[in-house]
Amino acid sequence: MAEPIPPEVLYWHVYTGEDGVSRQTLCTLTNFRLKGMSGAAPQWQNEIGTETSTVNVSIMPIGWIGEWHENPKPQWIVPLSGRWFVETMDGHRVEMGAGDFSFGQDQGCRPDAKGKKGHLSGTIGNEPCVVMIVQLQESAGPVGPCGYR
């Protein structure tokens, strides 16, 4: 029997480039291993962890705009319902909904001539957007785009 082929999962990575400008790029998680959890049958797992993290469920109301800001800490943002967008300083806008997710790591941006720093985010459509946010330690996470595999 052939070895099973590990899956791949896409995610958006919002990061700060060497020029201090926030950017985002589509990345792929590939480091999945078949592994059981607490006696359960094996399932594909990609363990991304740090010593400490905080989980927050946040609800962005209809019409919510987050103004220009940096992610407070490196964080995974997972939409559970509704839709939202993230626009980075380089002009790239990505719209996401349930099933999409993003790793926000744009700390340390330099403001541009118009005062933009980090990213702009907000809800899309006529329903609130519910997201789960997993914040990592401030120094956690790889540097540069697509560091998590």
Image (cartoon, grey):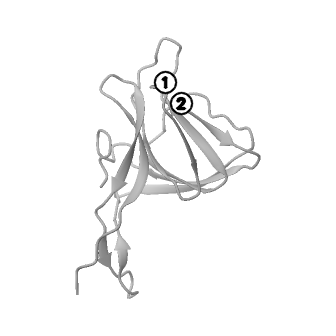
Locate the N terminus and report the quarter of the image it occupies: bottom left
**In the rendered image, the vertical position of residue 16 relative to residue 149, given as above or below:** above
Question: Would residue 102 appear left or right of 45 to someone viewing this image?
Answer: right
Mark 2 element type? loop
Q: Quadrant of residue 8?
A: bottom left
Q: Nearer the viewer, residue 52 or 13?
A: 13
Q: Residue furthest left?
A: 2
**In the rendered image, the vertical position of residue 73 relative to residue 22, given as above or below:** below
Q: Quadrant of residue 41?
A: bottom left
Task: Mark yes or no: residue 74 visible.
Answer: no
Which amino acid is tagged 2? His
* Total numbered labels placed on residues in the image: 2
Mark 1 element type? loop
Q: Nearer the viewer, residue 114 or 141?
A: 114
According to the picture, the residue beneath numbered tag 1 turns out to be: 117
**In the rendered image, the vertical position of residue 81 relative to residue 85, given as above or below:** below
Task: Mark yes or no: residue 146 visible.
Answer: yes
Q: Which mark is residue 69?
A: 2
**10 Å neighbourhood of mark 1: few (<14), some, or many (≥20)?**
many
Q: Residue at x 33, y 47 (%)?
A: 141
Question: Would residue 15 appear left or right of 77 to someone viewing this image?
Answer: left
Where in the figure is residue 15, as x and y percent of width and height?
39, 36
Which amino acid is tagged 1? Lys
Where in the figure is residue 42, as x and y percent of width and height?
35, 82
Mark 2 touching mark 1, by CB under 8 A? yes
For marks 2 and 1 on the same chain, the one whose residue lies earlier in the sequence: 2
Q: Residue at x 54, y 38 (%)?
A: 86
Q: Residue furthest front?
A: 1
Where in the figure is residue 91, as x and y percent of width and height?
49, 26
Q: Which mark is residue 107?
A: none
CA distance separating discs 2 and 1? 6 Å
**10 Å neighbourhood of mark 2: few (<14), some, or many (≥20)?**
some
